[in-house]
Image: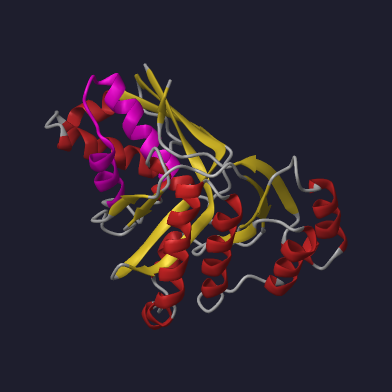
Amino acid sequence: MAQAACPASCGEIIQGWILGGEKLVSCPVAWYSHVEVTTGTPLANERPLTRAMLRQLLAHWQLPASLSSTLRIDCHSTIPVAKGMASSTADIAATAVAAARHLNQSLDEKTLAQLCVALEPTDSTLFSGLTLFDHNTAATRIPCGALPPTEILLLESPLTLTTADYHRMARQQALLDNAEILDSAWQMLQRACAQKDAALLGEAATLSAMASQTLLPKPAFTTLLNLVEQFGLYGLNVAHSGSVVGLFLDSARHDVGAVCRFLAKRELAAHWPKNYLLKMVAGGVKEG
């Protein structure tokens, strides 16, 4: 038996046309998918992508494909699905690491990323640090540096959008039109990590969120920006291919209760009926 856990993501800190192609930096938060791989009969209701990952791993390690039918995958996750929170990445990355441990095989982050991308566009939450990542090909993975200490008030919308649906959208021209803004956001994010500056991190995320409005607009976005300004928050980010929004803050400095009351009394409540105060984490799949 072996266990592993991978964090969810509150959308992306930045996503768009960066360094010659579409890339992202996920926003990992302390909300996890926990996976256990054991010897046993596969469950009838397991998540299909976890089994697909296991089959890929067996082929990668040149182990018999028949071994798949002797392995059971238990996935325990409350991460909302199809809202831009990297629920699938968390499931399949944790499955891969748990399976590697159970079968006494090696699996580095580079190989893990390549295997995940072979199944679907993948978030950079699987890396043990904020990472600029080509989520479609895994060809680019550039570490951003240290994580500024930040919390996130995650706003959950009832709206859903699958990753596949997002990638079927005509996005190329909008991505190219916003390339200069995303380059600025990328440079700012690197400075934020180098200086461990949460305000700069929030500013970079806000820039990317504003650019994303031309692709997948969030409702009441101007009101959200006004909220950030009124309460002196660090900034906001969005799920560029989903519906969640994150407010960057520090609960020791900012009045989270007052922010929640603002959300409850305004038209925002209809769009964002649920919220969760979460710690931002560096990312990476953990064993055990």
User: Does residue 169 show up magenta in the picture?
Assistant: no
Q: Which quarter of the picture shows residue 233?
A: bottom right
Residue, x 35% and y 26% (percent of image)?
A: 98
Which residue is more in the foreground, 178 or 88?
A: 178
Residue at the image position 37 percent from the left and 41 percent from the top: 127
Residue reaching furthest to the front: 195
The answer to which quarter of the image holds residue 219 is bottom right
Please tell me which residue is depicted at 26% across the width and 44% down the height of the picture.
115
**Is 107 left or right of 43, judged from the image as shown?**
left
Is 107 part of what is drawn in magenta? yes
Decide which of 107, 176 is in the foreground and name it: 176
Q: Examine the image and state in which quarter residue 245 appears.
A: bottom right
Residue 285, horizontal then vertical, whole percent? 40, 33
Q: How many marks?
A: 0
Magenta residues, start to end: 89-117
The vertical placement of 68 against 179, above or below, is above
Query: Which quadrant of the figure contains the N terminus?
Result: top left
In percent of width and height, residue 76 lies at 52, 31
Give the percent coordinates (x, y) of residue 217: 59, 74
- 186 w.r.t. 141: above or below: below
Query: Is residue 234 depicted above or below 207 in this figure?
Result: above
